[in-house]
Image (cartoon, rainbow, N blue to C red):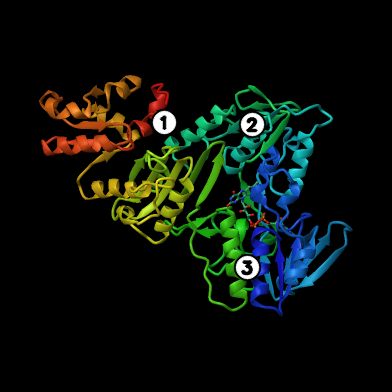
Amino acid sequence: MKIVIVGGVAGGMSTAARLRRLDEAAEIVVLERSGHVSFANCGLPYHLSGTIADRDDLLLQTPEGLRARFDLDVRVRHEVTAIDREARTVTIVDLATGRESVETWDHLVLSPGAAPFVPDVPGKERGHTLRNIEDLDGLVAALDGTPGGPVRSAVVVGAGFIGLEAAENLRERGLDVTVVELADQVMAPLDAEMALRVADELTAHGVALELGTSLSAVGEHAVTLADGRQVDADLVLFAVGVRPDTTLARGTGLAIGPRGGIAVDEQQRTSDPRIFALGDVAEKTDAVDGGAALVPLANLANRHGRRVADVIAGRPARSGVTQSTAIVKVFGLTAAMSGWSEKRARAAGVPVGVVHTHAASHAGYYPGAQAMALKVVYRESDGRLLGVQAIGHEGVDKRVDVIATAMRAGMAVEALADLELAYAPPFGSAKDPVNVVGYVAENRRSGLDDALQWHEVAAAVGGGASVLDVRTSEEHEAGHLPGALHVPLDDLRSRLAALPAGDLVVYCGVGQRAHVAARLLRQHGRRVRNLDGGWQTWSTSPAGRAVGVLV
Ligand code: FAD
């Protein structure tokens, strides 16, 4: 059996190595267009700052090493230019010599990845992209000094994961960095009130943000924005997303899915059952609604490589769904997410409940505890977990991973209350932030509490509700919701009769004291809703920013 694999990085090399472990007799050929295989794409941004000082640390394997360990025939700088499905061949060009050759196959595996999208603006050829080692070398050469003079400023176009990682590392290198983003927030998968925390971290570290605008031209030392303003840019990096590289698949008539990636079944087979596709080029199945999804993440490329090898070797295997679980470091912050955001669920017309909490990363009495903003989205009808977002410092990764696992298990949000998680003061809390989300949700879903979101306050007030702040005087004076009545929680019982008639929206710092207040008020016959996530969420939301609140 002869297997030809196109693309020798995440998906392709995972397939090749697993296949060899399963089948010592198979002939395995890996064809890679760039000069390197098995390099660490995910580490590329960190060489820009010198955090990963030695570029060669990003090169995880060589063709010689792969030949020795796995008996793989790995050819770098070999591009596959065509597939003949009838003859079961691929046409290959040796990029060093220009020589063309043909290779036969019994199974063909396509893992060519995705190509960075470059907007069609004048001067775009001056911009860089960051996808492989060659791109990195080009960027580093430009940063080290160009004929045009020293590089002092950079514009990163796109505020997604790669854009923000690049922005941070260019800033760490000492450049003046501006991020230009078409959307009105950074990190599009996050909800707005979560993304603002990331934006704050960027600006606090001197990265300028130009949101809600695009680039109209790239000049030699500046870019022009859509409104005509110029921004200094000795260097421009395009990080506006990637497109599945479907050139070969389209050329040979393989089915393309609704999102523009190669359509595959749950065994990663394309419309030609002898041809497999995986990684960034292939469409995935969304865990929430079962729809087609493009999710260019390394876990999926590696995991699906394992599955493709299993299927080729005759083992039962299925790829499963994707939750798009992702994480990024932005200076001192960690932002992580899995599943659907609130805005995505609402746009899809799925009625959802939402819990925001701001629990400490570990026991408050043990040094170094810091609050993490945690947001969980669940299906209103049955509580099924749909998504999680977390922004904070230590322990963000752990909480998102735990909730992502609960999502995969199909758990309901209130079941988080009963998870038994590792605890000692340096690591967590006897009421872990994950448990706290479960407690809050359990109270809401069992009817003990009722909540509203930051974006629902204006409508509630417009409908006649009064806003009640139950925090301390110091907290109230430092900033409060417009028009809020102030009654500290400990005075509430004695001032019940003085409260205005009608519906109440009650809030505190994060929602806990407001819950105590709401329980008291409800038992006195009042209709009351607790502002989810309290002041901590509202003040960092677009609603809070609109009235000029500073956190
Ligand atoms: P790739 O790993 O890109 O490999 C495809 C290879 O195919 C390429 O090397 C290409 O040269 C080759 N190829 C294409 N066409 C041909 C052809 N015709 N003939 C021969 N060879 C061909 N994911 C995360 O989950 N976490 C992260 O932190 C993260 N950070 C990232 C940072 C950067 C800068 C980048 C670029 C990506 C990052 N990713 C991250 C995404 C992750 O690297 C990709 O999802 C993953 O590499 C996809 O694997 P793949 O096999 O589909 O494609």
| Dot 3 alpha-carbon crowd within 10 angstroms: few under 14, some 14 to 19, many 20 or more | many
List x then y, in percent, for residue 545. Answer: 42, 26
Q: Which residue type carries mark 3? A: Phe
Residue 13 falls left or right of residue 303: right
What residue would you read off at disc 3? Answer: 276
Residue 219, image quadrant:
top right
> Which marked residue is nearer to the observer: mark 3 or mark 1?
1
Q: Is residue 485 visible?
A: yes
CA gap between label 2 and label 1 equals 28 Å
CA gap between label 3 and label 1 equals 46 Å
User: Which image quarter has ligand 1?
Assistant: bottom right
The front one of 20 and 353 is 20
Task: Identify the residue at image location x=74%, y=46%.
Answer: 54
CA gap between label 3 and label 2 equals 38 Å
Q: Is residue 360 above or below residue 38?
A: above
Q: Which residue type carries mark 2? A: Leu
Task: Identify the residue at image location x=66%, y=43%.
Answer: 45
What residue would you read off at disc 1? Answer: 540
List x then y, in percent, for residue 509. Answer: 32, 32
Q: Earlier in the sequence, mark 2 or mark 1?
A: 2
What residue would you read off at disc 2? Answer: 215
List x then y, in percent, for residue 96. Answer: 87, 56
The front one of 138 and 238 is 138
| Dot 2 alpha-carbon crowd within 10 angstroms: few under 14, some 14 to 19, many 20 or more | many
Q: Which residue type carries mark 1? A: Thr
